[in-house]
Amino acid sequence: MAGTARHDREMAINAKRQLSATSDPVERLRLQCLARGSAGIKGLGRTFRIMDDDNSRTLDLKEFLKGLNDYGVLIEKEEALKLFQHFDRDGSGQIDFDEFLITLRPPMSNARKEVIMQAFRKLDKTGDGVITVEDLRGVYNAKNHPKYQNGEWTEDQIFRQFLNSFDSPDDKDGKVTKEEFMNYYAGVTKEEFLNYYCGVSASIESDVYFILMMRNAWKL
């Protein structure tokens, strides 16, 4: 299923250790996100998306600084300016936050990306690019969950909890976009699904082990 708590703990420790040893602003921001666990990059993406009132999928400097601040990123203004200039390649005063998040993701092999997308396609039964409770009904067996077996939760509550593991703490809308599924694993959109799973991927060195974990988790 989602990244394990153990992987998240190990990743947070490693990210914090590496943070003190790097001065590269992009790497420092990436490590601050990973220090929050698998959903860290996905969460930053959600923060920016909430701010994007006109759906332009771009941010100016003021919005960029506010987004970093709202998400609790510890960064000097000078370093944030360098970051913004790095991503504002055409000097327009705007950055594309999809490109920004893609650059922020830890590098992943094509084999890892493909197995993540296989899992997303399997879960997205309706093919609309977003995973919802309805999609999960035929794929995810809630009856094996201990809280269903002891009568504490209904099937729908199990599905809701499952989707919550991908959603950001401040934005639990009951849908995991592919973004959330990638953002965590970064209703989960494809991009969010990738943003999630790039976080999980960062905690696992071996391609073989990562692919095996995904195949077992999603019965691919």
Image (cartoon, grey):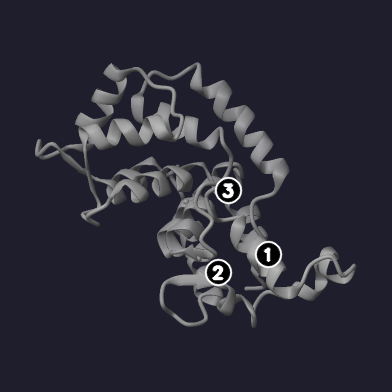
Q: Position of residue 144 (x, y in %)?
A: 81, 71
Which residue shows up at 64% across the image and 65% down it? 160
Q: Quick one: SS at disc 1?
A: helix
Q: Position of residue 206 (x, y in %)?
A: 61, 47
In the displayed structure image, the side of residue 194 where residue 137 appears, left or right: right
Q: Amino acid at mark 3?
A: Val
Q: Nearer the viewer, residue 132 or 88?
A: 132
Q: Give yes or no for contact between labels 1 and 3 (Cβ–Cβ under 8 Å).
A: no
Q: Amino acid at mark 1?
A: Ala
Residue bearing the label numbered 3: 200
Q: Give yes or no for contact between labels 3 and 2 (Cβ–Cβ under 8 Å).
A: no
Q: Is residue 59 above or below residue 98?
A: above
Residue bearing the label numbered 2: 119
Q: Give yes or no for contact between labels 2 and 1 (Cβ–Cβ under 8 Å).
A: yes
The part of the image, by quadrant, that contains residue 12 is top right
Q: Is residue 187 above or below residue 28?
A: below
Crowd rating for badge 3 (residues with CA inside 10 Å; few <14, some 14–19, many 20+): many
> Which quadrant is home to the N terminus?
bottom right
Mark 3–mark 2 Cα distance, whole angstroms, equals 14 Å
- Determine which of the numbered discs, if any, sits on residue 127 in the image: none
Q: Nearer the viewer, residue 48 or 16?
A: 48
| Residue 212 seen from this side | no
Mark 2 and mark 1 lie on one chain; the one further toward the N terminus is: 2
Which residue shows up at 42% across the image and 44% down it? 105
Which residue shows up at 64% across the image and 80% down it? 137
